[in-house]
Image (spheres, rainbow, N blue to C red):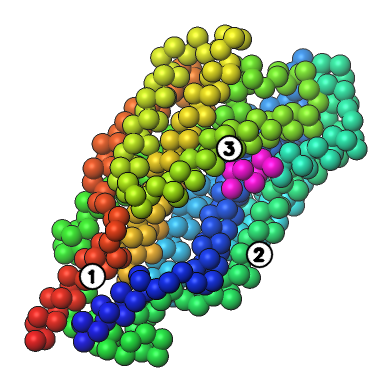
Amino acid sequence: MAKDQLQVLNALDVAKTQWYHFTAIITAGMGFFTDAYDLFCISLVTKLLGRIYYHKEGDSTPGTLPSNVSAAINGVAFCGTLAGQLFFGWLGDKMGRKRVYGMTLLLMVISSVASGLSFGSDSKSVMATLCFFRFRDILAGGMIAIMVSAVFKAYYPAPSYEIDANLSTVPEADYIWRIILMFGAFQALLTYYWRTKMPETARYTALVAKNAKQAAADMSKVLQKGNEFGLFTTRFFSRHGPHLLGTTSTWFLLDIAFYSQNLFQKDNFSAIGWIPKAKTMNAIEEVYKIARAQTLIALCSTVPGYWFTVALIHKIGRFKIQLMGFFFMTIFMFALAIPYHHWTLPNNRIRFVIMYSLTFFFANFGPNATTFVVPAEIFPARLRSTCHGISAASGKAGAMVGAFGFLYAADAIGVKKSLMILAFINFLGMLFTFLVPESKGKSLEEISGEADQEKGTETQSG
């Protein structure tokens, strides 16, 4: 019966590509799209929030968010994401991937709408409710911000801050950040609809739910012969402990560097003069130029990096892509940090942007793609969602360090030393990659060791 079971699972691997596979890819991709949009769109509107809610009459420069408020707004979503990945990862192994995926999407719909409707008119109440509801694709966020700000810029022209501080921020600007945040609800709702039209994953049904009508009848019987082991067992740690350490540590280290770069790239670009000084622009114009700069980076580096991974991941493998990505992220980050003053000179700004873009390219043609792929492949089906959730939560812990830590580090020790620290973090990620196994060209059962288990069971029953 073990042989029959493996044949059923093998049929999943060798099945011809059908419309269902494309639907699954799009739905899974929209999940990542929704998550990334929610996490990164806030960086596009923090400058606007500072102008609206922290303007001080008579100041020569526009209002800005205090460091603690900025860190809270950028980082609080990671706190909620971390808790959600641990809880819903565990729940996915108990209730099934389909049901839990739908639950999380509905929560994102509610939270996205509520974020845009953050209550109150004074700074404290708006920031508090915004942080509360953010607890619950990079490119898309920039494009939506460009379109929304362009429309408001055309309909509500305003002078720059240095010409007229009060008129530079029109009352209608308060709608811009709300629309950008609430747009996340639309894609989450659309993804939820698509997911409800798809069945539960076949491997969950076969290996975890043990549903005889939807999988092979003998599969359930074979899996009840005592070969299963739990997460907190010696057997799991001897077989998968190093792998779990590898996936959690590399995701943690990656997200420290990746999210600090992403969330604060507008500050780095402002520091070198690529984005004009705030006082030379009005509020809407500043949103537009920040969104344009970040979208340009995404188009030229972030998105191409992902497509390089798509094209080559089955040819050169996950391990090599991740190792190479961390290596070049380390090289380019050191190249930015060591001669930092050189990059701040007016004639070198574009070169700085190119170097900065290359770190994003190799993040996505590297660990930012592989760290979420590998945990979904190397662990047993009954623990796969839990282990992926633990790995992802570790990543969001790193994102919290990046969101809270980089801002304070840049203030305390300067951007140059902060970049040096990020370069060293990338180097550590390269070292911990050696704990992650290669999964190229293997079935999920071979990678996780479940195929060996079933062969052992077959031998015992024979």
Does the magenta segment cover residue 142? Answer: yes
- On the image, the x and y values in percent for residue 406 come to 48, 29
Can residue 228 be spotted in the picture?
A: yes
- On the image, the x and y values in percent for residue 281 come to 78, 22
Is mark 1 in CB contact (under 8 Å) with mark 3?
Answer: no
- Dot 3 falls on a residue whose secondary structure is helix
- Dot 2 falls on a residue whose secondary structure is helix
Residue beneath the point at 58% across and 18% down = 350
Between disc 1 and disc 3, whose residue precedes?
Answer: 3
**Disc 3 from disc 2: Cα separation:** 24 Å
Residue 294: quarter of image: top right
Q: Which residue is mark 2?
A: 190
Residue beneath the point at 61% across and 70% down = 194
Check the image and report above or below for 359 versus 410: below
Q: Amino acid at mark 2?
A: Leu
Q: Which residues are magenta?
A: 137-143
Front residue of this view, candidates 131 and 251: 251
